[in-house]
Image: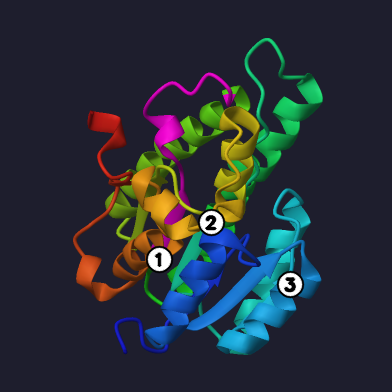
C-alpha cells in the first residue's frame, strides 16, 4: 500500500476513464494525488471520494499550467510525478478532418503535453527529480484510418517523450519520462468508438464484462497499474520507453 507513499503526483483528464483509474490506484498506494479536468463537478466528486485534490484545468491553455504548478508548490512544496493523460479522440479520416478539429486535437494532446512537461520539470528540479508519464496510444504505433489527428498527435507525444528522456538524463536532472500506449480499454472514449464504428453498445450488452473479455478489451486498471509502476522507485532505471498495453494487438 505504499509503493508511491507521499509522492505528489498530478494527473490531467482525471475526472473519468484512465485518468480516474490512475488516480485511484495511486492514492491506494499512498500518493498525494492532484486531479485536473475541465469537468469540475465530476472531478471534485471523485477527488472527494478517493481522497485526492482537484483543480479545474483546461490543459490547452498555457497559462493554466503555470497556475497549476504554482498551486501545487504552494500546497505541497514539491512535485514528484506528472501523468499527461487528458485527451480527445474525434473520429475522422484524412478526408473528413477539418482544420479546426486538427488544431483542437493538437492543442489538447501535443501542446498540453509540451507545456505540462516543461512546467513539471521546473518544479521537479527543485526537489531532485521525478517521473513523467505521457499517455500515448497504440495509434502512435500502427495506422488507424478513422483517427487521423489523434494518431498524429499520439505519434508526436511518443517522440517528444524520448527527447525529454534523453535531455533529462544528459542534463543529470534525475527526471524520467516514459510513454504509455494503451490499446482498446473499457473507457467512455472506447465505448463511443465501438458504438460509432461497429454499432456495438458495450454497456448495453446483457453481460458487458463477458462481451468485453470476448472482444479483448482491457480494463482501466490494466493501465493504472503500469502508471503506479512508472511513478514508483521500482522503475528508477526506466526512461525513454514506450509501454504498450494492448493484449498483443500490435503484434498479431
Q: Give the numbered dot on residue 221.
A: 1
Local secondary structure at mark 3:
helix
Residue pointed to by mark 3: 42
Q: Quadrant of the N terminus?
A: bottom left
Residue 38 horizontal/vertical position (percent): 76, 61
> How far apart are labels 3 and 1 at the CA level?
19 Å
User: Would you place residue 128 above or below residue 28 in this image?
Assistant: above
Residue 226: in magenta span: no
Local secondary structure at mark 1:
helix
Residue drawn where x is 67% and y is 23% of the image:
92
Badge 2, how many Cα within 10 Å: few under 14, some, many 20+? Answer: few
> How far apart are labels 2 and 3 at the CA level?
27 Å
The image's colouring method is rainbow
Residue 138: in magenta span: yes
Could one spot residue 188 in this view of the protein?
Answer: yes
In terms of depth relative to the viewer, which is nearer, 159 or 216? 216
Q: Magenta stretch?
A: 131-147
Residue pointed to by mark 2: 206
Residue drawn where x is 42% and y is 89% of the image:
6
Residue 43 horizontal/vertical position (percent): 70, 73
Amino acid at each position: 500500500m505504499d509503493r508511491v507513499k507521499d509522492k505528489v503526483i498530478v494527473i490531467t483528464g482525471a475526472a473519468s476513464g484512465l485518468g480516474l483509474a490512475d488516480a485511484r490506484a495511486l492514492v491506494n498506494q499512498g500518493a498525494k494525488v492532484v486531479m485536473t479536468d475541465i469537468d469540475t463537478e465530476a472531478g471534485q466528486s471523485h477527488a472527494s471520494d478517493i481522497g485526492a485534490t482537484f483543480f479545474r484545468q483546461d490543459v490547452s491553455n498555457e497559462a493554466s499550467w503555470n497556475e497549476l504548478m504554482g498551486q501545487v508548490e504552494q500546497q505541497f512544496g514539491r512535485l514528484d510525478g506528472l501523468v499527461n493523460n487528458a485527451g480527445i479522440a474525434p473520429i475522422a479520416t484524412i478526408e473528413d478532418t477539418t482544420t479546426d478539429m486538427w488544431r483542437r486535437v493538437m492543442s489538447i494532446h501535443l501542446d498540453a503535453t509540451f507545456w505540462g512537461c516543461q512546467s513539471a520539470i521546473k518544479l521537479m528540479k527543485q526537489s531532485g527529480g521525478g517521473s513523467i508519464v505521457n499517455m500515448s496510444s497504440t495509434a502512435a504505433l500502427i495506422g488507424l484510418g478513422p483517427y487521423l489527428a489523434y494518431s498524429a498527435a499520439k505519434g508526436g507525444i511518443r517522440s517528444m517523450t524520448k527527447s525529454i528522456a534523453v535531455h533529462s538524463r544528459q542534463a543529470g536532472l534525475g527526471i524520467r519520462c516514459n510513454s504509455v500506449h494503451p490499446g482498446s480499454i473499457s473507457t467512455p472514449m472506447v465505448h463511443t468508438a465501438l458504438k460509432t464504428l461497429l454499432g456495438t453498445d458495450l454497456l448495453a450488452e446483457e453481460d458487458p464484462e463477458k462481451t468485453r473479455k470476448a472482444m479483448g478489451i482491457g480494463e482501466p486498471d490494466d493501465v493504472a497499474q503500469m502508471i503506479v509502476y512508472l511513478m514508483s522507485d521500482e522503475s528508477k532505471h526506466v526512461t525513454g520507453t514506450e509501454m504498450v498495453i494492448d493484449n498483443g494487438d500490435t503484434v498479431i
